[in-house]
């Protein structure tokens, strides 16, 4: 669908429109594309209309997978923005889809949690939630997001269910697989409006309306929730300065972010058994200290494009400044803002 072909409506007009095409209203852009889902439109443009997807990294043909595994079995985050909630034996990546396998004695739940801002915007709005599966099965449900109901917009498919939840004002989308069963998922979509635009039928076959999303665009969305940097011997990741507070010595590390993260305090951790190396470059290049993966930050602060991480570093000299490097190829600094 070509945006230039579409009229636009102001954000304030969203509530009663039939075919809403945007998450960008929640991003504060003020204008939202609008299209009419009709045979006329399809014949005129030669393209199936497609609303923006309010889910991130939900095209499983080639998802962003910065954790780097081909299979996940532990509870927690797997591919970017998606997490094993409970009852899951494994989530496995294949060429063109993922497989969700449930434990023998429990439903397996796989979930994406929306941001607080998007959740707040969606209450009272009509949305459509859809999933396309590898076995040519397609399921979708449309309804209004209520404020106060815990679980809603639930519908069954052959191997489980899809539904949304509201937990303390934060929305999530979940797909489940029945005990001792598995499901192969090609793509998912949450969109504004009463008409789904994830897929259409060509003969007896369900076909996605869109090509795979631009990987760099999906990565940028994912980086609003988690940024991982490093992965090399002497790989530069930021700068440092050493100062004092009372009788303690602290090192503050500044890491530039590629995109503005959610407005919260992220969890910061050094991945692997490596460490961060503090390198002074004033007169000569030399290492003046390290921060190990077991050390916990004293404080973390986010600005628009930078994360400041402060560690207590006894024994170092106040006033020093320099660069921060990772010590080996498996050492990463993870700034995690996931929900």
Image (cartoon, helix red, strand yellow):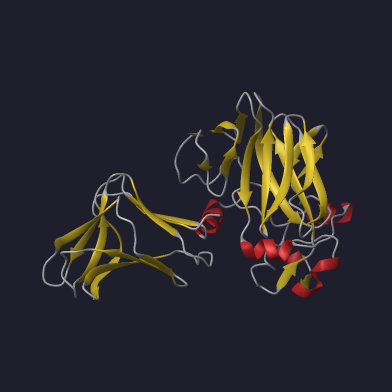
Percent x, y of residue 263: 53, 68
Residue displayed at 23% across by 70% down: 248
The percent coordinates of residue 152 (x first, y second) are 78, 49
Does residue 186 appear anywhere in the picture?
A: yes
Q: Say which residue appears at 50% left-offset and 64% top-offset.
A: 261
Count of labels in the image: 0
Point out residue 162 in the picture as x, y percentages from the top left corner.
73, 41
* Camera-nearest residue between 193 and 174: 174
Give the side of residue 45 with respect to residue 180, left or right.
Answer: right
Decide if residue 170 is on the left or right side of residue 91. Answer: right
**Quadrant where the image shows the C terminus:** bottom right
* Residue lying at the far front of the rendered structure: 247
Visible residue check, residue 209: no
| Relative height, residue 120 to residue 108 (above, below) | below
Residue at point 70%, 57% (across, down): 52
- Please determine whether, in this image, residue 248 is positioned above or below residue 236: below
Residue 110 coordinates in the image, percent (x, y): 62, 40
User: For this rendering, which residue is in front, 31 or 49?
Assistant: 31
In-image side of 275 versus 218 (left or right): left
């Amino acid at each position: 669908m070509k945006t230039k072909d579409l009229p636009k409506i102001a954000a304030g007009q969203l509530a009663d429109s039939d075919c809403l095409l945007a998450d960008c209203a929640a991003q504060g852009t003020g204008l939202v594309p609008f299209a009419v889902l009709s045979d006329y439109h399809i014949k005129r443009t030669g393209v199936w209309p497609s609303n923006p997807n309010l889910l991130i990294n939900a095209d499983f043909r080639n998802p962003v997978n910065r954790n780097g595994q081909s299979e996940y079995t532990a509870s927690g985050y797997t591919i970017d923005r998606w997490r094993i909630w409970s009852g899951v034996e494994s989530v496995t990546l294949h060429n063109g889809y993922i497989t969700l396998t449930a434990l023998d004695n429990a439903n397996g739940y796989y979930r994406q949690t929306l941001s607080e801002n998007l959740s707040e915007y969606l209450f009272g709005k009509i949305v459509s939630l859809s999933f396309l599966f590898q076995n040519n099965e397609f399921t979708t449900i449309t309804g209004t997001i209520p404020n106060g109901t815990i679980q809603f917009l639930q519908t069954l498919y052959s191997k489980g269910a899809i539904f949304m939840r509201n937990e303390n004002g934060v929305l999530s989308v979940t797909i489940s697989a029945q005990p001792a069963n598995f499901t192969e998922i090609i793509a998912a979509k949450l969109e504004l409006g009463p008409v789904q635009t994830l897929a259409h039928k060509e003969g007896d076959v369900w076909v996605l309306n869109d090509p795979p999303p631009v990987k760099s665009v999906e990565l940028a969305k994912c980086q609003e929730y988690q940024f991982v940097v490093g992965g090399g011997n002497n790989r530069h990741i930021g700068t440092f300065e050493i100062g004092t507070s009372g009788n303690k010595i602290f090192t503050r590390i500044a890491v530039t972010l590629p995109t503005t993260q959610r407005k919260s305090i992220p969890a910061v951790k050094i991945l692997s058994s490596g460490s961060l190396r503090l390198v002074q470059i004033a007169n000569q290049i030399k290492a003046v200290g390290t921060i190990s993966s077991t050390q916990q930050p004293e404080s973390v602060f986010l600005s628009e494009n930078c994360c400041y991480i402060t560690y207590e570093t006894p024994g170092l000299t106040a006033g020093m400044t320099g660069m921060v490097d990772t010590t080996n190829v498996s050492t990463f600094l993870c700034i995690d803002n996931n929900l």
